[in-house]
Image (cartoon, rainbow, N blue to C red):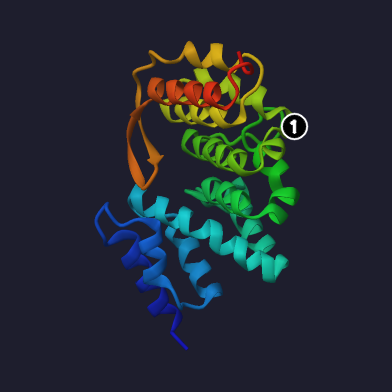
Amino acid sequence: MTPSGSIRRQVRAVLEGPGPNLGLDQARERLAGLPTPALVRALLAGLSAPTPLARWRAVGLLGPLVAGLAEVEPEAGREVLRRLMWTLNEESGAMGWGAAEAFGEILRHSPLLAREFANILVSYVSPCANQLDHPALLAGALWGLGRLAQAQPELARSCGAPEVVRELLGHPDARVAGAAAWAWGWLGGEGAATALEERRDDGRALEFPLEDGVGEVRVGSLAQQARDRLAQADPGKNK
């Protein structure tokens, strides 16, 4: 049996060591064969890694891993989500870096857990529920909601999520505004195209998860991409 300390070191080396060209598939190959429970624990610890790229890798690796765990042992998957929820609770004393993103990424890959926990994720962006106060955490919840919408759009749209996300398009923090624009491109909803068009000249910059890493983008670029995505999906809707 591989000692837990050795597993943590292996995971940390994959998350933090390689250059930006290491994709998630390659990262999974490097960690293949490690026992799932210990790997999950190490990746959860990796959510507080010192660099955005390392945290992004932890999120991306956790999603399918926990979803696969939940297929075999549903309660184990639920426990991971409960642990993430606890770190987002003020009483925990933790900041919860990466927790909301991981929450959404897990739900994206697990229909079972999405049915049970989608309303919790939506509550993290709703001012009438449990909206996260810290802009970085709120932006993470918006990103997670967008990831869920890619796979389970109806669940992601529950509890009035599109309307809440629309209100966050004009948030004073670029991270929140950019994540809201990106998420709305997957959620859609009445007036989406017009509202996103109004944000296309927003030149504020933010670090944002891209296809295979993290890079700097403008809020307006994310809004334009979201508008284009909605237009391609259904030209007659979301105007």
User: Which residue is at the front of the view, 104 or 82?
Assistant: 104
Q: In this view, does 203 lie to the left or right of 37?
A: left
Question: In the rendered structure, which amino acid carries the disc numbered 1?
Answer: Cys
Q: Evaluate whether residue 173 shows in this view.
A: no
User: Which residue is at the front of the view, 90 or 52?
Assistant: 52
Q: Which residue lies furthest to the bottom in this view?
A: 1
Give coordinates of residue 143: x percent, y percent. 52, 38
> What residue is rendered at 35% in x and 66% in y?
12
**Numbered circles on residues, count:** 1
Q: In this view, does 127 lie to the left or right of 235?
A: right
Judge the density around disc 1: few (<14), some (14-19), many (≥20) Cα neighbours within 10 Å: some
Q: Evaluate whether residue 149 shows in this view.
A: yes
> What residue is rendered at 45% in x and 22% in y?
223
Quarter location, residue 222: top left
In the rendered view, would you say 217 is above or below 220? below
According to the picture, the residue beneath numbered tag 1 turns out to be 159
In the rendered view, would you say 210 is above or below 81? above
In the rendered view, would you say 107 is above or below 169? below
Q: In this view, does 20 lie to the left or right of 194?
A: left
Give coordinates of residue 17: x percent, y percent. 27, 62
Identify the secondary structure beneath mark 1. Answer: helix
Quarter location, residue 69: bottom right
In the rendered view, would you say 235 is above or below 76? above
Q: Is residue 227 left or right of residue 82?
A: left
Quarter location, residue 14: bottom left
Give coordinates of residue 113: x percent, y percent. 70, 54
User: Which residue is at the front of the view, 108 or 54?
Assistant: 108
Give coordinates of residue 231: x percent, y percent. 54, 21
